[in-house]
Image (cartoon, rainbow, N blue to C red):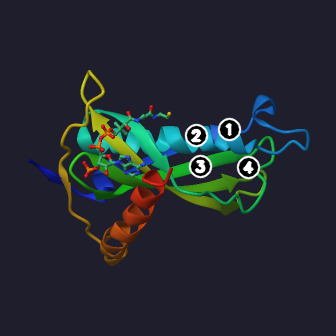
Amino acid sequence: MKTKTPRESTVEMTELVLPNDTNLLGNLLGGRLMHLIDVAGAMAAQRHCNRVVVTASIDSVDFRHPVKQGRAVILKAKVTWVGRTSMEVRVDVFSEDFLTGRQEFNSKAYLTFVAVDADGRPVEVCGLCPETDEEKQEYEDALKRRDERLKRRNTP
Ligand SMILES: CC(C)(COP(=O)(O)OP(=O)(O)OC[C@H]1O[C@@H](n2cnc3c(N)ncnc32)[C@H](O)[C@@H]1OP(=O)(O)O)[C@@H](O)C(=O)NCCC(=O)NCCS
């Protein structure tokens, strides 16, 4: 099966924070941001495997700064590791103030997606060939993250 690079799966998604997306303080709701993270991650995974994917797991996410209404939230996603049918995707989240042009890092999340057939059964995905030193390190470290997830999955 063909091998792809993390670059080939890269997705960048920009959303304007509108009133409906915010809490009573006018900041982006955490649940809304989680939704955007899931969508951006799923698109990167689908771009890698050219299959329908489902979310198997989302690692913990810390929100470092509030994102105010009227700002942009920018999500950058790419595949960081693949198994037989599963893919780990990292999503980095930034906010942008249009009035100053300043961008701020907000959060990072790792998600695991599984490629499935029309009956929802896992199917094999193509391999991943990391290019940069950072991608190679992240690929190596992914095994530890995967172990933690599978331990969590098997804990009642
Ligand atoms: C994800 C899902 C397809 C896995 O199916 P399954 O029959 O349990 O299949 P397997 O146990 O063979 O797992 C398939 C792959 O997913 C991985 N996986 C499953 N659960 C995982 C988890 N919680 N974290 C990380 N990887 C996971 C397995 O390690 C395996 O990876 P590999 O093929 O790369 O080695 C199935 O559990 C499912 O459909 N879950 C619901 C998905 C969904 O609806 N998501 C939306 C939110 S509810």
Q: Earlier in the sequence, mark 3 or mark 2?
A: 2
Q: Disc 4 and disc 1: Cα gap in Å? A: 20 Å
Q: Is residue 153 left or right of residue 143?
A: right
Q: Nearer the viewer, mark 1 or mark 3?
A: 1
Q: Please name the residue that numbered disc 2 is placed on.
A: 36
Q: Nearer the viewer, mark 3 or mark 4?
A: 3
Residue at position x 39%, y 57% in the image: 150
How crowded pointer 1 is (Cα within 10 Å; few <14, some 14-19, many 20+) is rated as: some
Quarter assignment of residue 14 = top right
Task: From the viewer's side, name the closer residue of 141 and 101.
Answer: 141
Q: Is residue 123 left or right of residue 26?
A: left
Height in image: 50 above or below 102?
A: above
Q: Please name the residue that numbered disc 1 is placed on.
A: 32
Q: Disc 2 and disc 1: Cα gap in Å? A: 6 Å
Q: Which mark is residue 74?
A: 3
Q: Disc 1 and disc 3: Cα gap in Å? A: 13 Å
Q: Are marks 4 and 2 in contact (CB under 8 Å)?
A: no
Quarter assignment of residue 6 = bottom left
Residue at position x 62%, y 57% in the image: 61
* Amino acid, disc 3: Ile
* Amino acid, disc 1: Arg
Q: Disc 3 and disc 2: Cα gap in Å? A: 10 Å
Q: Please name the residue that numbered disc 4 is placed on.
A: 98
| Disc 1, SS | helix
How crowded pointer 3 is (Cα within 10 Å; few <14, some 14-19, many 20+) is rated as: many
Height in image: 103 above or below 75?
A: below
Q: Nearer the viewer, mark 3 or mark 2?
A: 2
Whole-percent x, y for residue 19 in the image:
81, 32
Q: Disc 3 and disc 4: Cα gap in Å? A: 12 Å
Q: Are marks 2 and 1 in contact (CB under 8 Å)?
A: yes
